[in-house]
Amino acid sequence: MPSPMPSKNTPKKLNPNRNSNRGNFRISSTRNPQHGQEILCMLLTLTATPAELHLPDDNFPVTAKGFLAMRFPPALLSLVCSVFLLATTAISADPVPPKSDAKAPLLVGIAEQDITPPTGFPMAGYYHERLAEGTINPLKAKAIVFREGNTAAALVVCDLIGVATDLSREVRKLASEKTGIPASNIVVSATHSHTAPDYMRELYLYLTQNEDQNPQRAKYIEKLIDGPVNAIVQAHTNAKPSSLASGSATQTTPVAFNRRSVMRDGSVLTWQAESNPKRIRAAGPIDPQIGVLAIQDTEDGTTRGILSNFALHLDTVGGMKWSADYPFFIERTLREAFGPELISIFGAGCCGDINHVNPASSVRNKSDFIGNSLGDSIRDEVAQLTPLEHTHLAVKSEVVQLPLEEATAEQVERSAQTIELIKNGGKADFFDHVIAYKKLVLDQIRHSQPHEKTAEYLTWGRSRSLAGIGETLPVDVTVITLGNDVAIVTLPGEVFVELGLAIKQASPFRTTIVVELSNVVETIYVPHRAAYASGSYEVTNSTVMPGSGEMLVETAVRLLRQAATENEQAKSHQTASTSKPQDSASDSRSTATTLVVTTPEPPTATSSTQVHSDATPKAEEETPFPKRGSSMIEHTVTFRLKHASGSEEETGFLNAAAELATIPDVRDFQIRRQTSVKNSHTFGISMRFDTPAQYKAYNEHPLHVRFVQQRWLNEVVEFQEADFEPLD
């Protein structure tokens, strides 16, 4: 059972996990903070040794400090607790009911920072070294931050080929420290520009403080880290009430094509023209929808920013100069329509098997044509977007362990030989080159002691965070939702379009924006299971096993369902708290402070914290179980928190949950910790009500409404509720 949380000014609290035979204590509620502090001081004195007890100089009342000078024999423990319980109950009675907090408005901030590398820095995108010779258009890190009450989320999209785990972890950590947004609520994504920097080796040297690193390249890595961090910080700072509208435009001008083709021998090949007589058809669909979220200033009506999302590979420029590719032209088109201050944030849709090459034509669409066409479609749709009326912000994130391909000693040795051959000017089959490089990446990720000196061969794919991590790759699936209308889903790697379409189809939200290449790029491609049976380039260039894509879809859909359920709860609680006047006479009954003293016992199937809502202890009372038809309701919920086990945040949540026991007519209130591994939930709460009316009153009580809005919706990752009635 978690220990009561001390004042946040207390320099050190008692360790809630320490062994003790003196009993556990919980203060489940107090209306007067000073009275609660006095009781807490007394209980700490009774249960702590002098070495364990630390108090601030000015925070606790003088009466409590004087009490701390006293030491009580264990035999007087129950008597002393009872006396102070009764005294505090009488003093803290407050007939004025608490007022439910007004719903905090949704604030939205947008910002951008330059991350263009210098001339001479390595360029990404291909299997040979290229050094940049100049700049066509600048590379940017563009952030959007959502804030509502205690909940906040950030998405920063960078003009990069991918986001290495090393980069995302560093950016999320620093941005979290500077803004207070939980790192798990921060997503760093890439547009997949092939005219962006090949930075992973230099980032590795920078993070490991390698003295041999080129100072100019180290300076750029600082810029690469600071850019997304500062964009998030700036967006967080300038966040303000905004009008949001969402929807999707249909791209009618053909700019995207499925690049995998079914051949007459049953195989699938990439990059095949229709003129090839062995080609039958495209192996998959495209996604013609452009997801759009427009952010307008509530004061002057100007469009501050547009978040858009389309499934099309960014490899339309080529050459040796830096370029943001076609999203640059999307922004230019939108700025011409909505003003030069608009920030256009483009998130790459699931386009692992999509590119801009029309197999029916020998002419390739160019970057400006693609960007201008997409920009026109977005511009024309803005006036048709649906305004968001309910903007409750929810953020769900889950780490998924994707199984990695094998990299045996024999495979790695052969791969090293292939790369060595190419470095020395020799020739190798393209697919052999792709496999060799991938196996070397897998060697340093899977093995704490790599089979080969992979550092000598890798530029892209070198990782400090993932080195020696083992058989699975930890990746993030994050869902950010706004009311019933908008869901932003972020996935790792280059995801096949079919997987993105599956998420959209299953999503309960009107507009679902699925952004790939988020937080982790080391998957490389993420095909669907059927593609593995067909083969070709994307499957060859994937580090994860078949079924990994489906794992991402299942996780995303589950998180979307959870967010939709909680959004409906938030709407009902908000309606209840604003529409029904509070019964002050009824509420005055909940002012009694309840103290339950339990003796620690070895855990059985579950470990339990029990708090009764009445002032009279009920530890020994047996309540007859009502027969069916008696209208008794037992309400239960199991859940998992986003906090680390044993953390202060977890303890704070559980203590806040325990106060629900003080709501009138709550009976047999219990908080339990699960000790089995039958599911991912770690805690359970249960309580009983004699009538459905009592249960309804509990749901509408200001204390419950406030707990749901301020704690539950922000700190619970997943949950399952059930309400029971007795059997005959």
Image: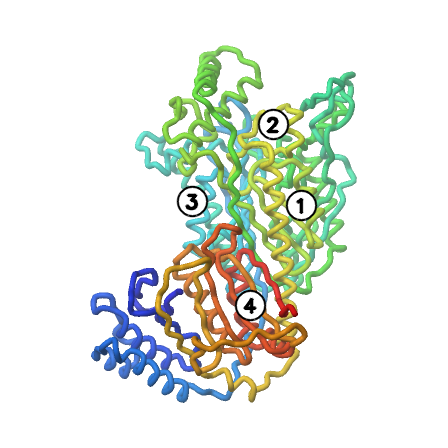
CA gap, disc 1 and disc 4: 27 Å
Q: Secondary structure at mark 4?
A: helix
Q: Which quadrant would residue 32 be assigned to in this image? A: bottom left
Q: Are marks 4 and 2 in contact (CB under 8 Å)?
A: no
Read off the residue under disc 2. 539
Amino acid type at mark 4 = Gln
Closer-to-camera residue (559/440): 559
Can residue 328 be seen here? The reply is no
Above or below, comparing residue 89 to residue 420 in the picture: below
CA gap, disc 3 and disc 2: 30 Å
Q: Earlier in the sequence, mark 3 or mark 1?
A: 3
Task: Indicate which disc residue 503 carries.
Answer: 1
Q: Earlier in the sequence, mark 1 or mark 4?
A: 1
Read off the residue under disc 3. 170
Q: Earlier in the sequence, mark 4 or mark 2?
A: 2
Residue shown at 49% from the left, 23% from the top: 437
**Callout 4 crowding tier (Cα within 10 Å): few <14, some 14–19, many ≥20:** many
Residue shown at 68% from the left, 44% from the top: 333
Q: Are marks 2 and 1 in contact (CB under 8 Å)?
A: no
Q: Which quarter of the rendering shows the N terminus?
A: bottom left
**Residue 7 position within the rendered picture, expressed as x and y whole percent measured from the top left:** 35, 71
